[in-house]
Image (spheres, helix red, strand yellow):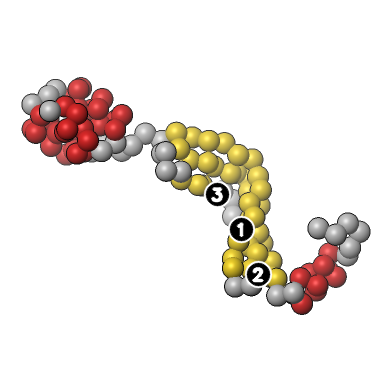
Amino acid sequence: MFPGMNPKKMQAVMKQMGISQDEIDASRVIIEKTDSTRIIIEPVSVTKIKMQGQETFQIAGEIREETSAPEISEEDIKTVMEKTNKSEEEVREVLERTGDLAEAILELS
């Protein structure tokens, strides 16, 4: 932040300004995105910063992204098969693509 400043002095200045900083002992951070992908940060360094009543997190580490397929239960497959009179293969394909029971029934009807 300020080059050449002693880290202990920096902590004291931050404390005077009402800023606290704590290291969090974490081995991995997973961020689940709305598009069903996940950002995985591992190994990770996590710092919690509290300033003016707000808590923020600083995360640093190696990042990789994964796509997760929606979990489809056998009960969901049977339900859609009963409502649409379609084969298990057709139902499974649509459920994997949509991830939504109602949408699958509408699409297959």
Would you say 95 lies left or right of 32 here? left
Instruction: State which mark lies toward you, 3 or 1.
Output: 1
Camera sees residue 57: yes
Identify whether 67 is placed above or below 40. Answer: above
Which label's residue is closer to the chain start, 3 or 2? 3
Q: Position of residue 35 (x, y in %)?
A: 42, 38
- Mark 2 belongs to which amino acid? Met
> Toward which corner of the image does residue 40 lie, by quadrant?
top right
- Check disc 3 and report its element: helix, strand or loop: strand
> What residue did someone put label 3 on?
29
Identify whether 23 is placed above or below 97. Answer: below
- Check disc 2 and report its element: helix, strand or loop: strand
Q: Nearer the viewer, residue 52 or 72?
A: 52
The C terminus, quarter of image:
top left
Q: Residue at x 41, y 35 (%)?
A: 68
Q: Nearer the viewer, residue 32 or 26?
A: 32
- Mark 3 belongs to which amino acid? Val
Would you say 107 lies left or right of 56 here? left
Which label's residue is closer to the chain start, 3 or 1? 3
Q: Residue at x 8, y 32 (%)?
A: 82
Classify 10 Å Cα crowding around label 3: few (below 14), some (14-19), many (20 and above).
some
- Mark 1 belongs to which amino acid? Phe
> What residue did someone put label 1 on?
57
- Check disc 1 and report its element: helix, strand or loop: strand
Identify whether 36 is placed above or below 25. Answer: above
Q: CA distance from mark 3 to mark 2?
A: 22 Å
> What residue did someone put label 2 on?
51
Q: Position of residue 81 (x, y in %)?
A: 12, 30
Camera sees residue 24: no
